[in-house]
């Protein structure tokens, strides 16, 4: 197999890896009824005029399954962190005791669970679309190489390898979505 073909296959695999990583990040922010510090990954805090991820200005922990505790490294950051959580539209009601912030995670209703499962499936579908898009880009690049003189056998082999990758990554997406769905529906 030529170096160009191997490069296209590796590039395709890397792109599919990114789709899986993005899916895991997106699903990590969905709450499944139990506290998880990853729920706050998208929250940005105004830290002396710069928007900074909350994890870079405070320790985030889960003392129990229903509580997230946020301990700012500077006492002056309690108010900005609280404001950032409220403005993040995550649906949390932070409680500030002057030194730290606590967030109680309410139990999910059946209706909310069903809505979250729909969100999970939508994110999974987006990941599959990204994987298929990577396949299409790789196949287009292979076709260009064919026009430049790549043999039919090499083209066929490369297309088969890319399809096999696509199938594997599609299966990974299914497994991740299924695991998250089970996590959400578990009471």
Image (spheres, rainbow, N blue to C red):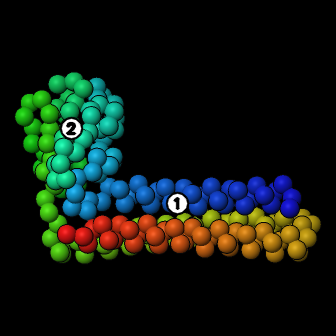
**As drawn, 92 above or below 175:** above
| Among the 4 quarters of the image, the one containing residue 15 | bottom right
> CA–CA distance between discs 1 and 2?
30 Å
Relative depth, front residue between 187 and 150 = 187
In the picture, the quarter occupied by the N terminus is bottom right
In the picture, the quarter occupied by the C terminus is bottom left
Q: Is residue 38 left or right of residue 106?
A: right
Disc assigned to residue 152: none
Residue 87 point in image, percent of width and height: 20, 47
Residue 86 point in image, percent of width and height: 17, 47
Residue name at image x 32 percent, y 71 percent: 182
**As drawn, 49 above or below 134:** above
**As drawn, 66 above or below 33:** above
Residue name at image x 51 percent, y 67 percent: 172
**As drawn, 135 above or below 71:** below
Residue name at image x 66 percent, y 60 percent: 12
Residue beneath disc 2: 70
Residue 57 point in image, percent of width and height: 29, 31
Residue beneath disc 1: 19
Identity of the residue furthest to the left in this view? 97
Residue 150 point in image, percent of width and height: 89, 67
Q: Nearer the viewer, mark 1 or mark 2?
A: 2
Q: Count neighbours of disc 2 (C-alpha within 10 A) and say few if under 14, some if 14 to 19, many if 20 or more.
A: many
Q: Count neighbours of disc 1 (C-alpha within 10 A) and say few if under 14, some if 14 to 19, many if 20 or more.
A: many
Residue 83 visible here? no
| Among the 4 quarters of the image, the one containing residue 56 | top left
Determine whether the residue tagged by mark 1 lies in a helix, strand or loop.
Answer: helix
If you read the primary sequence from the N terminus, does the residue marked by circle 1 or circle 2 appear first?
A: 1
């Amino acid at each position: 197999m030529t170096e160009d073909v191997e490069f296209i296959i590796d590039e395709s695999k890397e792109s599919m890896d990114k789709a899986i990583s993005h899916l895991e990040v997106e699903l990590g922010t969905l709450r499944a009824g139990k506290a998880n510090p990853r729920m706050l990954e998208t929250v940005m805090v105004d830290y002396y005029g710069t928007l900074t991820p909350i994890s870079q200005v405070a320790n985030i922990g889960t003392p129990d399954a229903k509580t997230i505790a946020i301990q700012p490294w500077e006492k002056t950051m309690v108010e900005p962190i609280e404001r950032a959580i409220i403005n993040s539209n995550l649906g949390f009601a932070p409680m500030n005791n002057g030194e730290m912030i606590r967030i109680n995670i309410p139990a999910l209703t059946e209706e909310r669970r069903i809505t979250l499962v729909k969100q999970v499936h939508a994110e999974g579908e987006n990941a599959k679309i990204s994987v298929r898009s990577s396949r299409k880009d790789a196949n287009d690049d292979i076709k260009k190489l064919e026009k430049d003189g790549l043999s039919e056998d090499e083209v066929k082999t490369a297309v088969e390898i890319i399809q096999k990758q696509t199938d594997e990554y599609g299966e990974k997406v299914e497994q991740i979505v299924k695991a998250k769905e089970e996590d959400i529906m578990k009471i």
